[in-house]
Amino acid sequence: MMNNKMLSWIFVVTLFFGSCSDDSDDNTNTATFNGESFSLDKGFLEPAGLNYDSDGEPIETYAIDVYLMSATVEYNSSVDEFSGEGNLIALDLNTSEENELASGTYTYSDEKGLRDEFVLSGGEVYINYDVSVEAPKGEEESITGGTIEVSINGDEITFLIDLTTESSTFTGTYTGTLQSI
Protein backbone atom coordinates (compact mmCIF):
# COMPACT_ATOMS: atom_id res chain seq x y z
CA MET A 1 0.00 0.00 0.00
CA MET A 2 2.80 2.38 0.88
CA ASN A 3 4.50 1.63 -2.44
CA ASN A 4 1.28 2.39 -4.35
CA LYS A 5 0.86 5.73 -2.57
CA MET A 6 4.50 6.58 -3.25
CA LEU A 7 4.17 5.61 -6.93
CA SER A 8 0.95 7.60 -7.21
CA TRP A 9 2.61 10.64 -5.67
CA ILE A 10 5.60 10.35 -8.03
CA PHE A 11 3.20 10.01 -10.96
CA VAL A 12 1.25 13.14 -9.95
CA VAL A 13 4.43 15.19 -9.42
CA THR A 14 5.88 13.98 -12.73
CA LEU A 15 2.63 14.75 -14.53
CA PHE A 16 2.45 18.22 -12.98
CA PHE A 17 6.01 19.23 -13.81
CA GLY A 18 6.00 17.44 -17.16
CA SER A 19 2.93 19.33 -18.29
CA CYS A 20 4.33 22.71 -17.32
CA SER A 21 5.74 24.53 -20.28
CA ASP A 22 6.58 28.03 -21.26
CA ASP A 23 3.20 29.30 -22.38
CA SER A 24 4.62 32.59 -23.58
CA ASP A 25 4.18 33.47 -27.22
CA ASP A 26 7.73 32.96 -28.49
CA ASN A 27 8.02 34.81 -31.79
CA THR A 28 11.81 35.01 -31.89
CA ASN A 29 13.27 34.86 -35.39
CA THR A 30 10.03 35.48 -37.21
CA ALA A 31 8.89 38.25 -39.51
CA THR A 32 5.63 39.39 -41.04
CA PHE A 33 5.34 41.13 -44.39
CA ASN A 34 2.09 41.90 -46.18
CA GLY A 35 0.19 39.63 -43.76
CA GLU A 36 2.45 36.60 -44.35
CA SER A 37 4.69 35.25 -41.58
CA PHE A 38 8.01 33.48 -42.11
CA SER A 39 11.16 32.64 -40.21
CA LEU A 40 14.45 34.51 -40.12
CA ASP A 41 16.85 31.62 -39.56
CA LYS A 42 20.27 33.20 -39.99
CA GLY A 43 22.05 36.47 -40.34
CA PHE A 44 25.14 37.95 -41.94
CA LEU A 45 27.09 41.14 -41.30
CA GLU A 46 29.24 42.87 -43.91
CA PRO A 47 31.32 45.87 -42.82
CA ALA A 48 31.24 48.36 -45.70
CA GLY A 49 33.82 50.81 -44.39
CA LEU A 50 34.18 54.39 -43.27
CA ASN A 51 31.49 56.86 -44.32
CA TYR A 52 32.25 60.14 -46.13
CA ASP A 53 30.33 63.40 -46.31
CA SER A 54 29.22 65.07 -49.56
CA ASP A 55 32.62 66.81 -49.86
CA GLY A 56 34.47 63.50 -49.69
CA GLU A 57 35.69 64.08 -46.15
CA PRO A 58 35.61 61.08 -43.78
CA ILE A 59 33.10 61.19 -40.94
CA GLU A 60 33.34 59.13 -37.78
CA THR A 61 30.72 56.54 -38.68
CA TYR A 62 30.88 53.23 -40.49
CA ALA A 63 28.45 51.50 -42.83
CA ILE A 64 27.42 47.98 -41.86
CA ASP A 65 25.25 45.86 -44.16
CA VAL A 66 23.09 43.25 -42.41
CA TYR A 67 21.24 40.39 -44.09
CA LEU A 68 18.60 38.35 -42.23
CA MET A 69 17.10 35.42 -44.12
CA SER A 70 15.25 32.15 -44.26
CA ALA A 71 17.14 28.84 -44.14
CA THR A 72 16.71 28.25 -47.89
CA VAL A 73 19.00 31.14 -48.85
CA GLU A 74 22.71 30.31 -48.60
CA TYR A 75 25.88 32.35 -48.71
CA ASN A 76 28.82 31.03 -50.75
CA SER A 77 32.02 32.67 -49.50
CA SER A 78 34.15 31.33 -52.37
CA VAL A 79 32.20 33.44 -54.90
CA ASP A 80 30.96 36.05 -52.39
CA GLU A 81 27.27 35.76 -53.24
CA PHE A 82 23.95 34.41 -52.01
CA SER A 83 22.04 31.59 -53.67
CA GLY A 84 18.71 29.85 -53.26
CA GLU A 85 15.11 30.93 -53.00
CA GLY A 86 13.46 32.37 -49.91
CA ASN A 87 12.84 35.49 -47.87
CA LEU A 88 15.41 38.02 -46.74
CA ILE A 89 15.87 41.57 -45.61
CA ALA A 90 18.95 43.65 -46.44
CA LEU A 91 19.74 46.63 -44.19
CA ASP A 92 22.23 49.51 -44.57
CA LEU A 93 23.00 50.60 -40.99
CA ASN A 94 25.44 53.23 -39.72
CA THR A 95 27.37 52.90 -36.48
CA SER A 96 30.30 54.34 -34.59
CA GLU A 97 31.91 50.88 -34.43
CA GLU A 98 34.29 50.01 -37.26
CA ASN A 99 33.38 46.36 -37.90
CA GLU A 100 30.29 45.74 -35.78
CA LEU A 101 26.97 47.19 -34.79
CA ALA A 102 26.39 49.22 -31.64
CA SER A 103 23.35 48.70 -29.42
CA GLY A 104 20.67 51.32 -29.99
CA THR A 105 17.70 52.31 -32.12
CA TYR A 106 18.44 52.80 -35.83
CA THR A 107 15.92 55.12 -37.51
CA TYR A 108 15.30 55.25 -41.26
CA SER A 109 16.25 58.43 -43.09
CA ASP A 110 15.93 59.10 -46.80
CA GLU A 111 18.05 62.24 -46.53
CA LYS A 112 20.68 61.74 -49.22
CA GLY A 113 24.12 61.31 -47.75
CA LEU A 114 22.99 61.17 -44.11
CA ARG A 115 25.33 58.66 -42.50
CA ASP A 116 25.07 59.63 -38.84
CA GLU A 117 25.29 57.03 -36.11
CA PHE A 118 22.07 55.01 -35.64
CA VAL A 119 20.72 55.83 -39.11
CA LEU A 120 19.15 53.17 -41.32
CA SER A 121 20.14 54.55 -44.73
CA GLY A 122 18.19 52.07 -46.80
CA GLY A 123 17.32 48.49 -47.39
CA GLU A 124 15.24 46.00 -49.29
CA VAL A 125 12.74 43.28 -48.44
CA TYR A 126 12.84 40.20 -50.70
CA ILE A 127 9.93 37.73 -50.56
CA ASN A 128 9.95 34.33 -52.32
CA TYR A 129 13.03 35.62 -54.03
CA ASP A 130 15.27 33.42 -56.17
CA VAL A 131 18.76 34.88 -56.02
CA SER A 132 20.25 31.90 -57.92
CA VAL A 133 19.19 32.96 -61.39
CA GLU A 134 20.70 35.59 -63.69
CA ALA A 135 17.59 37.76 -63.44
CA PRO A 136 16.35 37.26 -59.84
CA LYS A 137 12.65 36.47 -59.42
CA GLY A 138 10.29 37.29 -56.59
CA GLU A 139 8.89 40.26 -54.75
CA GLU A 140 11.25 43.14 -53.89
CA GLU A 141 10.36 46.32 -52.00
CA SER A 142 12.45 49.22 -50.73
CA ILE A 143 12.29 50.27 -47.10
CA THR A 144 10.69 53.70 -46.75
CA GLY A 145 10.52 54.24 -42.98
CA GLY A 146 10.67 52.81 -39.48
CA THR A 147 13.10 51.71 -36.80
CA ILE A 148 15.27 48.78 -35.83
CA GLU A 149 16.20 48.30 -32.19
CA VAL A 150 19.52 46.48 -31.76
CA SER A 151 20.60 44.86 -28.49
CA ILE A 152 23.91 43.07 -28.10
CA ASN A 153 24.78 40.57 -25.38
CA GLY A 154 28.19 38.99 -26.01
CA ASP A 155 28.08 37.29 -29.43
CA GLU A 156 24.28 37.29 -29.49
CA ILE A 157 22.43 40.14 -31.19
CA THR A 158 18.72 40.92 -31.12
CA PHE A 159 16.87 42.94 -33.76
CA LEU A 160 13.37 44.29 -33.11
CA ILE A 161 12.20 45.40 -36.55
CA ASP A 162 9.32 47.77 -37.33
CA LEU A 163 9.58 49.07 -40.90
CA THR A 164 7.42 50.34 -43.72
CA THR A 165 7.99 49.59 -47.39
CA GLU A 166 6.56 50.97 -50.60
CA SER A 167 3.25 49.11 -50.11
CA SER A 168 3.26 47.33 -46.75
CA THR A 169 4.91 46.88 -43.37
CA PHE A 170 7.70 44.57 -42.27
CA THR A 171 7.87 43.61 -38.59
CA GLY A 172 9.92 40.95 -36.91
CA THR A 173 12.51 39.80 -34.45
CA TYR A 174 15.80 38.03 -34.82
CA THR A 175 18.04 36.82 -31.99
CA GLY A 176 21.25 34.97 -32.77
CA THR A 177 24.70 35.49 -34.12
CA LEU A 178 25.71 37.20 -37.35
CA GLN A 179 28.30 35.59 -39.57
CA SER A 180 30.80 38.11 -40.96
CA ILE A 181 31.16 38.12 -44.72
Image (cartoon, grey):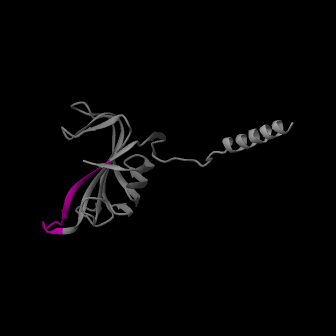
* Magenta stretch encompasses residue 43: no
Please determine whether, in this image, residue 33 is positioned above or below residue 92.
above
Q: Return the residue found at the far right.
A: 1
Q: Position of residue 13 (x, y in %)?
A: 73, 44
Residue pictured at 41% horizontal, 43% vertical: 40
* Nearer to me, 139 or 103: 103
Report the number of numbered marks.
0
Q: Where is residue 140 in the image (x, y as percent from the top left)?
A: 33, 41
Q: Is residue 89 visible?
A: yes
Please determine whether, in this image, residue 85 is positioned above or below residue 140.
above
Q: Return the residue found at the far top.
A: 133
Q: Position of residue 72 (x, y in %)?
A: 36, 34
Q: Position of residue 96 (x, y in %)?
A: 28, 66
Question: In this picture, which residue range is highlighted in magenta?
Answer: 44-58
The image quarter in which residue 10 lies: top right
Give left or right: position of 2 versus 31.
Answer: right
Give left or right: position of 34 versus 65.
Answer: right
Give left or right: position of 24 versus 86.
Answer: right
Give the main secondary structure of the magenta stretch. Answer: strand
The image quarter in which residue 8 lies: top right
Residue pictured at 45% horizontal, 46% vertical: 29
Q: Return the residue found at the far left.
A: 56
Q: Quadrant of the N terminus?
A: top right
Q: Is residue 128 visible?
A: no
Residue pictured at 30% horizontal, 37% vertical: 74
* Nearer to me, 63 or 42: 42
* Magenta stretch encompasses residue 48: yes
